[in-house]
């Protein structure tokens, strides 16, 4: 069941859902707007030109209020907000249609597990022929919350728990 604005506000007041910082205007009828943070990470070139899943990737991370995303460029970014989800709530990250129509694809794995705490890393890709200027604080998407039928037996406690900033892939830590 997707949560309504009333339920989201009640959970925020009770402290069972935490989002910080949060302005009242971010709460929409069935979602919460997410804003772009000021941390951006770019994959560094590999000497071999090949990325493998079993080796740590190197990233160049910058902190800036603006970032110019070139055509066909990929960058990791972060939300301005830090989230703490209870063990019976999951969320979906959705990009804004108005930005998608400009050629800016905003993605992440699309899924936030119950029990997750942290800023959400976003994968941004510019399919436009022109560069796109990104600004920290700009609404870039929304989080849609869904209540589970019961608490998770094993809430999220993975390698991205507590992350802050644009966090690179930790696939190399996977065992198989």
Image (spheres, rainbow, N blue to C red):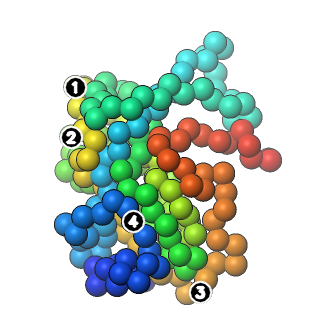
Q: Quick one: label 2 or label 3, which is nearer the N terminus?
A: 2
Name which of mark 4 and mark 3 comes first in the sequence.
4
The answer to the question of whether label 4 and label 3 lie on touching residues, with beta carbons closer than 8 A, is no
Q: Which mark is residue 130?
A: 1
The reply to whether discs 2 and 4 touch (Cβ–Cβ < 8 Å) is no
Tell me how far mark 2 sits from mark 3, CA to CA. 40 Å
Element carrying mark 1: loop
Q: Secondary structure at mark 4?
A: strand
Mark nearest the camera among 2 and 4 is 4
Kindly state the secondary structure of the residue where label 3 is placed. Answer: loop
The quarter holding residue 131 reads top left
* Labels 2 and 4: the sequence-earlier one: 4
- Label number found at residue 70: none
CB-based contact (under 8 Å), mark 1 and mark 2: no
Residue 58 in the image, given as x and y percentages of width and height: 60, 26
Residue named by callout 2: 102
Mark 1 vs mark 2: which is more N-terminal? 2
User: Which residue is under mark 4?
Assistant: 19
Figure quadrant of the N terminus: bottom left
């Amino acid at each position: 069941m997707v949560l309504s604005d009333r339920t989201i506000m009640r959970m925020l007041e009770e402290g069972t859902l935490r989002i910080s910082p949060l302005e009242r205007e971010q709460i929409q009828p069935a979602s919460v707007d997410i804003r772009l943070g000021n941390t951006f990470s770019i994959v560094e070139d590999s000497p071999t030109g090949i990325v493998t899943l079993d080796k740590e990737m190197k990233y160049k991370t910058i902190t800036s209020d603006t970032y110019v995303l070139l055509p066909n460029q990929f960058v990791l970014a972060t939300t301005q907000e830090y989230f703490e989800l209870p063990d019976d709530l999951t969320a979906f990250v959705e990009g804004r249609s108005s930005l998608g129509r400009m050629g800016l694809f905003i993605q992440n794995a699309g899924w936030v597990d119950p029990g997750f705490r942290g800023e959400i890393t976003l994968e941004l890709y510019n399919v436009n022929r022109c560069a796109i200027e990104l600004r920290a604080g700009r609404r870039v998407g929304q989080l849609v919350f869904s209540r589970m039928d019961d608490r998770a037996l094993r809430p999220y406690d993975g390698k991205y728990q507590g992350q802050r900033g644009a966090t690179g892939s930790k696939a190399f830590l996977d065992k198989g």
